[in-house]
Amino acid sequence: MIIDFKNFRKKKFSPSSTFLLDHIKITSVIFLVLIIGSSLFLDKPLALCFNSFPAVFHELFGFFSKLFCPIAWSLILPTVFFYIRFLMRKEKKSRKVWYVSLAIPLSVLLCKILALVIGKANPEWFFFHGETPFRFLQWNRSFHSFPSITAVTIAAFAASLAAVFSNFRLPLLFAGLAFSFAPALATNCFLSDSLAGIYVGSIAAQWVFRKVRREISI
């Protein structure tokens, strides 16, 4: 048996477009353990630590969070789709934008439902009251911390782009993972909220991709 080591070294590891869904039993357990562990041991100490950092630190990561405003991207992407599809008349490229424009709003909608049902207090409430209670089905935004809507948007954006641009899949996923922690560093949410947002956003985007891929070729 002859092994071509030259070609073997050229091969690069790249996860599939739906790798979290493909191994959902394993990935869900891993994220659940990380989220529970963070909630029990890391959330409050890290929030207090990040809150003690200089204001410029919060402004920097707060700026990163604002770049991924869910409402803004939910409006921008459909506009880009219509421009590419009907003005530029590039159907193949418009399909990719159409998929991303579906993935992000659906991910955000799922996040809002979960946040409303779970009702976890955000770090601001913790700093003032010294506790992180759960108040289910509360319309008060102070109890919509879990999962982080910003982390969901970033993760969905990165996962959807990674699905359609396979050559840049790993850099996009790593960038999305790094940016998804910006809300926690800015003390807009807890670490466990960002972790939950990463999983919810990625799973939702990959689920949409699986549905869309069955009907059209991206």
Image (cartoon, helix red, strand yellow):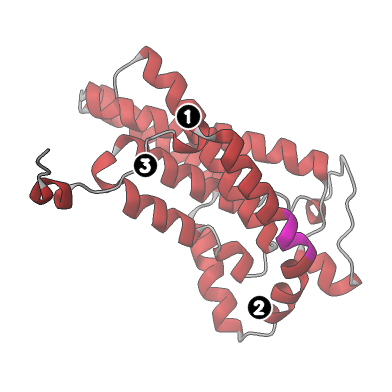
- Residue 77 appears at what percent x and percent y? 41, 37
Q: Which mark is residue 121?
A: none
Q: Nearer the viewer, residue 24 or 166?
A: 24
- Residue that numbered label 3 is attached to: 15
Q: Quarter of the image containing the N terminus? A: top left
> First in sequence: mark 2 or mark 1?
2
Q: Please tell me whether residue 151 is drawn above or below residue 52 in the rendered image.
A: above
In this rendering, would 211 be left or right of 145? left
Q: Which residues are magenta?
A: 36-40
Residue sitting at x 39%, y 34%: 79
- Residue 91 appears at what percent x and percent y? 24, 21
Q: Please tell me whether residue 182 is drawn above or below residue 110 in the rendered image.
A: below
- Number of marks in picture: 3
Q: Nearer the viewer, residue 6 or 121?
A: 6
> First in sequence: mark 3 or mark 2?
3
- Cα gap from disc 3 to disc 1, whole angstroms: 22 Å
Label 3 amino acid? Pro
- Cα gap from disc 2 to disc 1, whole angstroms: 34 Å
Q: Name the dominant secondary structure of the magenta segment.
A: helix
Is residue 38 magenta-colored?
A: yes
- Residue that numbered label 1 is attached to: 102
**Furthest residue to the top?**
215
Residue sitting at x 69%, y 81%: 49
Q: Quarter of the image containing the C terminus? A: top left
Figure quadrant of residue 167: top left
Q: Which mark is residue 50?
A: 2
Label 1 amino acid? Leu
Local packing at callout 2 (Cα closer than 10 Å; few below 14, some 14-19, many 20+) is: some
Q: Nearer the viewer, mark 3 or mark 1?
A: 3
Residue sitting at x 28%, y 40%: 165
- Cα gap from disc 3 to disc 2, whole angstroms: 33 Å
SS assignment at label 2: helix
